[in-house]
Image (cartoon, coloured by chain):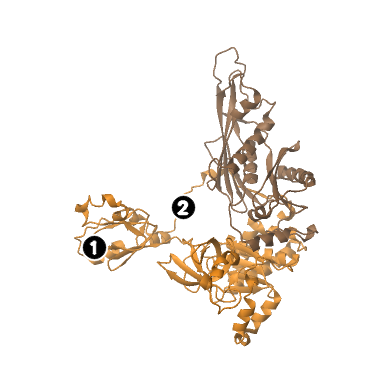
Amino acid sequence: MSAANKILNVITHSKDIGNIDFNIQLSNEAKEIYNFESSDDDFDMTSDSDDEETENKKLVNQMIAPGDLVIRSNEYMKGHNTYTTEDLKPIAFSGEETQKDDELNIYSSTLGVISKINKLISIENVNKNLYMAEIGDHIIGQIVEVTSSKKWKLNINGNNLATLQLSSINLPGGLLRRKNEQDELNMKQLLKVGDLINCEVQGVYANRNDVHLHTRSLNYGKLRNGALIKVKMGLIQRKKTHTHFFNNNSIKIILGCNCFIWVSHEMTDRVNNNDKGPQTIKSDITRIEQDTSFEIYSDINDPNIDIKKRILISKYIIIIKILAFNNLVISEQRISALYDMLLSYKTGEGMETVGSESLYVFNDPEVMQELGSQLIQSEKMRG
Amino acid sequence: MNVLFSKSEKSYFRESLINDDSNQCLRLDGRGFKQMRTVEYSPSFLNNCNGSTRMVSQDGSEVIVSCKVQLLEVDTKLDEASLLNELIQVDLSIPSIDNGSKLLTQMEDVLKENIVQHLKGTDKLKVTQKYSFQLFIDILAINCNTYPLGLISLATHKTLKNTLFPVLMSQDDDLMVEQVPVFHDHDMKLIEIPCSITFVVAIVGDNVLLVDPSEEELQIADNCLLLNYIEGKKVVGPVRTIQFNEEYSRSFNPKIISEALELINYVGEEVYTVL
């Protein structure tokens, strides 16, 4: 039998692992894109170079590391992610080196690609492990701070914390009510540190550093009855819809654009409401008033989730983990395809029980890899 | 470590585990209560140490353990306990935890105790009357997503199992003679240093015991037990408790300790056969 009932599954690697060359061999393509070689030399550009086209060629699309000199010139202006030595100098010393005023050194403050618009030099960050917000993205955030100025700060897997204003949420007791001081005092009761919020990006300011969120729709709000999985950036693509229902609408999976995934149990009566679709739009405003009671901010889970549903939730979590393990883009089709494969995998191994004990088989790296390659093959067959 | 979970998430995890019927309980990753996470390991991967292990757990936690052997001239006035304390040097570093923090010193202490305890009354590290082997065990947790003691103790155990010692060429009785021990140039031998494995057992509710808890399970556990197991002697003392959360921490029924001991007797035996 496989790892199903084993206490500890151990995978041993061969002894000569020490001899493996750890130098990462980059493909030629990658080298071309990032142009590593040329980034080594500084761009000693003097202000008297007239040929602007060669200048542009030299500057634009170069990879640059933090602290590297971008350009030495007084003609250019510093843009985002750059700094000059002027910034670092304490005010007291600024008067001493006046003779160098005509030459301004611009340095990079991040790993990125240089971009130049007219005389403005800025560095575009290339760290793809962080989420870059775009307006309209459906994301999941976690509250890390309740500030005094009517704001919550959320971790959205980006380089900065996002902001959720008190005015951007549905207050209990109706949409059209004005926010008063009492609400400000109750902020901590509504959303606490650690709470997971299903929300939308309302606006992106200051070169994607300041992200504003809103939850002004009944689809958004606090998340309950499930668990969060974080996956690598890039595994979720922007789509029309990010909320998917599986298994006769009993499981809801929200694929947040910031690669936070929420898997939860969905109460059936809510789902029926959603299915009606266009008819309910007229009565929407009254419904909002009814539904936005304090309940939407409660922490108490639905008491009716039984063990079968919990197993189902765990199964979908494992499915997402398998997809992430194989670096496959997570989509609705793939999740349901893999779910079917899990069912057939079980019968293939001769294990009929759907008990919790056998679920762990799928956490085995080898099984994960096998399932991933099976999935890719079946996708290729279909074309 | 220190992953932030929302309140509803935590209560969901806890509700999954608390039930009168133990068949109705479920760990989030679908493991059995006795089941540990899959471990990948590569032995002796460092060339400049006497023994080393790299171990990666399922959740991405990664630990490197290396053991270096040195010769030490023994101060004969020392009693056995303080001598062993000097002979075994454990150095643990975890980037996410500050040096000298309570958590880190406790882990270091547990790991040292695991080795020192079983060396008492044995001459395993003794080379000659005057000289002894000194072990430097360096542990680096490259990435730890949960309380790493269980993984570290497995890796330490594995390292000591494959640590090679130089073979003595000169005489071993040098009390009267003034001489430095001479070792063989190439030949190395294996000395089995006994080392117990520490298991982390989380207690949730009245009757649920979880072996090798994951981070979310630590966050909702009433209490955690640290139990040491060594082959032959089964579970050995001391039994320690540790808490990882403020929300759910509470006392537990003493009966559960004996249950945990039985559980680890069973689990430990299995783990020894696998390793």
| Quadrant in the rendering for residue B26 | bottom right
Query: In the image, residue B190 lies at what x, y percent?
Result: 63, 32
Determine whether B59 is above or below A287 in the image.
above
Which chain is in brown here?
A: B
Helix, strand or loop for disc 2: loop
Query: In the image, residue A352 lies at what x, y percent?
Result: 77, 63
Q: Quadrant of the C terminus of chain A?
A: bottom right
Q: Which residue is mark 2?
A: A24
Q: CA distance from mark 1 to mark 2?
A: 39 Å
Tell which of B116 and A298 is nearer to you.
A298
Query: In the image, residue A139 lies at what x, y percent?
Result: 54, 69
What residue lies at 68% left-to-right and 60% top-to-bottom? B13
Which amino acid type corresponds to the residue marked 2 in the rendered image?
Ile
Q: Which residue is mark 1?
A: A75
The mark lying in front, picked from 1 and 2, is 1
**Crowd band around label 1 with a 10 angstrom C-alpha radius: few (<14), some (14–19), many (20+):** few
Q: Tell me if I can see residue A333 in this picture.
A: yes
Which chain is in orange here?
A: A
What residue lies at 54% left-to-right and 36% top-to-bottom? B49
